[in-house]
Image (cartoon, rainbow, N blue to C red):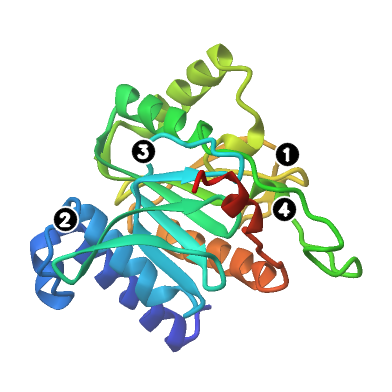
Amino acid sequence: MSQPFFERLKGYYVNIVGLLRDGVGASRIFPNSGDIGSSRERIYAQFLKAHLPPSCNVQFGGFLFDQDGKESKQIDIMVTDGSALQFKLPVNGEGGKSFACIDGTLAVVSIKSTLDSAQLADSLLNISSIPDKRPLSTERVPFILNIPSFDDWPFKIVYASNGMQLETTMKALEDFYEKQTDIPLHKRPNLIHVLGKYSVVRTGKEGGVTRDGTRIEPNKFHGMADPTGVFGLVWAALQIQQIASGSKYTIYRYDEMLNKIQL
């Protein structure tokens, strides 16, 4: 039986879901005078800012790049480590669109108003375009430390306020990756969240376990009804927080960029 606190905590997240559903109402609570992206992008970004550790920088996206100059397609929201370089051009005193190095990026979010097969494919292609990180080495992290799931960083989210049914999404995922077999697992979303409908989680190499104890195969998409929307929000915050905890032991260096800029 749930303790009273957890009932209140559920109510807290249900209220957050209500704010996400009503961008206008949420704008009154989280004022943002700048015209930065869509209302849904702003409100989801504010949710992340309010629930992730202070070491996380949440910013409106543009693209990710690696230190060889490769660039991703459009990324709506990026979460970067507090020790990572930032590239943000202010617009009228507010943070505008930005770009970020993949080294130091903790999470990315693709935002859709309504998730249909075409919009899902667009998000999957954008996520697949993210460049690869520099590998870990003893120069970047003490060799005695084990940072699990580093290969799967950043945490990749597709979020929509509305969308097709869960069964349709699962079929669309299967069809997409049957055609795009060259896209590696670490460039596929970790979470697909359609608010008030369902969440789809990709398991890691060790698989997973549902709340009722059912085992889930490794490296598989698992869909579940999420009518309150609470699971999708809490799962996103928890997973990004875990990556942020591991990231603080990683040294990010960007010296190579200077040598590649023609001065």
Image side of residue 252 versus residue 148, left or right: left
User: Which residue is rendered at x = 64% and y = 72% of the image?
Assistant: 245
As measured in the structure, the alpha-carbon distance from the residue carrying label 4 to the one carrying label 2 is 32 Å
Q: Earlier in the sequence, mark 4 or mark 2?
A: 2
- Residue 39, numbered label: 2
Q: Contact (CB < 8 A) between labels 1 and 3?
A: no
Going from N to C along the chain, the mark reached first, 3 or 2, is: 2
Give the SS element for disc 2: helix
CB under 8 Å between callouts 3 and 4?
no
Where does label 1 land, which residue?
A: 218
Residue type, mark 2 in image: Ser
Q: Nearer the viewer, mark 3 or mark 2?
A: 3
Query: Residue at point 20% right, 51% down?
Result: 37
At numbered mark 1, what does the secondary structure look like: helix, strand or loop?
Answer: loop
Q: Nearer the viewer, mark 1 or mark 4?
A: 4
Residue placed under numbered mark 3 in the picture: 74
Q: Are marks 3 and 2 in contact (CB under 8 Å)?
A: no
Give the Cα separation between the discs numbered 3 and 2: 17 Å
Q: Residue furthest top?
A: 179
Residue 91 figure quarter: bottom left
Q: Nearer the viewer, residue 67 or 46?
A: 67
